[in-house]
Amino acid sequence: MQENTEEKNEIDVAILYRNVLYVLECKTVNYNKQRDKARDALYKLETLKKLGGLRTQMAFISYRSLPQSVIDRATGAKIKIFEEKDLHNLKAHLEHWKQQ
């Protein structure tokens, strides 16, 4: 029996607004317990950003709070973070983000 080793790549949300591509990755994982999954999600966004071009904007939306190491890596890669504390007003945060 052969194991299926194909990676499944999908984009949670992609928006084209004023000729800028916005890609959002949405997760519910507890990254304090599974940091490798956060690393994988950020790597995916970093790769998509390179493919999308200079104006492409990336965001990582997490249902839970994120460890500081994940926030630092995202900040260094210019990936906008929205986490648990931001979700109650996510619409306003997203509108502000796309206006920057």
Image: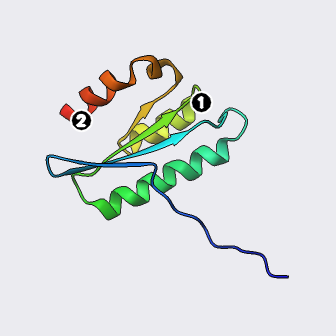
Question: Which disc, if any, is residue 98?
Answer: 2
In the rendered structure, which amino acid carries the disc numbered 2? Lys
Q: Percent x, y for residue 16?
A: 23, 50
User: Crowding at label 1, few (<14), some or many (≥20) Cα neighbours within 10 Å?
Assistant: some
Vertical arrangement, residue 98 with respect to residue 19, above or below: above
Tell me how many marks there are: 2
| Disc 2 and disc 1 in contact, CB within 8 angstroms | no
Q: Residue at x 50, y 54 (%)?
A: 43
Quadrant of image for the C terminus: top left
- Asked if residue 16 lies left or right of residue 88, the reply is left
Q: Percent x, y for residue 5?
A: 69, 73
Q: Percent x, y for residue 22?
A: 30, 47
In the rendered structure, which amino acid carries the disc numbered 1? Pro
- Does dot 1 land on a helix, a strand or a loop? loop
- Does dot 2 land on a helix, a strand or a loop? helix
Instruction: Give the quarter of the image for residue 51.
Output: bottom left
Quadrant of image for the N terminus: bottom right
User: Crowding at label 2, few (<14), some or many (≥20) Cα neighbours within 10 Å?
Assistant: few
Q: Mark 2 and mark 1: span between their CA atoms?
A: 25 Å
Q: Percent x, y for residue 65?
A: 57, 25
Q: Residue at x 49, y 56 (%)?
A: 44
The residue lying furthest to the left in this view is: 18
Colour scheme employed for the rendering of this structure? rainbow
Please indicate, yes or no, whether residue 100 appears anywhere in the rendered image.
no
**Along the line of sight, the residue nearer the viewer: 72 or 83:** 83
Q: Residue at x 45, y 17 (%)?
A: 88
Q: Earlier in the sequence, mark 2 or mark 1?
A: 1
Vertical arrangement, residue 77 with respect to residue 99, above or below: below
- Asked if residue 88 lies left or right of residue 54, the reply is right
Q: Mark 1 points at which residue?
A: 67
